[in-house]
Amino acid sequence: MNVKDTARRWGRSEKVVRTYCQEGIVPSAEKKGRFWDIPQNAPAPPLTRHGLVLLLESILLQADGAAVNFRRIGYPEIEVVLGYRYLSDQLFISGFSETEPIEKALAQAKCTQRGRKLIAAHKESKNKGRKMIAGEIGINAGKPHILGKFEKDDS
């Protein structure tokens, strides 16, 4: 299926589906030339990219010894469980068992390399365009940057 058909089936915009494919949120999607080929049986992610990354980060925090209360993540409990199930089914996490209570299942879960790549991609996209060097305003202090900030001119 193409992005347009998948977007219609999932009830998401084409841009969102394309972004999911580019960032690996839909691991079964394949880029063929300029287009994405998405299997018809590919499940729709139950949460936004931000929500999925939040769940992944909660697993990393718990692995580092932090107490994580999944009920305070900001999503209804059923969406959190569906999010963890999606992450497990798509191999972003391993060791997650649906037969265990959620707290115990999360204690056993591990973030895979695919999960870490998604976290990194999310952080990179959040910081995109925000890395500007602010210089002092004054006579010959700098040249104006495109967004009105000043970049120090070392020449």
Image (tube, grey):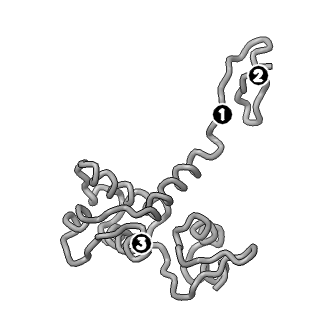
| The furthest residue to the top | 139
Residue at image point 79% right, 24% down = 143
N-terminal label among 1 and 3: 3
Residue at image mark 1: 132
N-terminal label among 3 and 2: 3
Q: Nearer the viewer, mark 3 or mark 2?
A: 3
Dot 1: within a 10 Å radius of its alpha carbon, few (fewer than 14), some, or many (20 or more) residues? Answer: few
- Quarter of the figure with residue 88: bottom left
Name the quadrant of the N terminus.
bottom right
Cα gap from disc 1 to disc 2, whole angstroms: 13 Å
Give the numbered dot on residue 153. Answer: 2
Q: With 14 as the anchor, is 102 left or right in this view?
A: left
Percent of width and height locating residue 32: 70, 78
Closest to the observer, 142 or 113: 113
Percent of width and height locating residue 14: 65, 72
Cα gap from disc 3 to disc 2, whole angstroms: 47 Å
Name the quadrant of the C terminus.
top right
Residue at image point 59% right, 77% down = 29
Residue at image point 28% right, 49% down = 64
Residue at image point 65% right, 81% down = 37
Closest to the observer, 63 or 5: 63
Residue at image mark 3: 91
Amino acid type, label 3: Leu
Closest to the observer, 150 or 27: 27
Q: Are marks 1 and 3 in contact (CB under 8 Å)?
A: no
Element type where label 3 sits in the image: loop
Amino acid type, label 2: Asp
Closest to the observer, 10 or 33: 33
Q: With 87 as the anchor, is 19 left or right in this view?
A: right
Image: 40 above or below 25: below
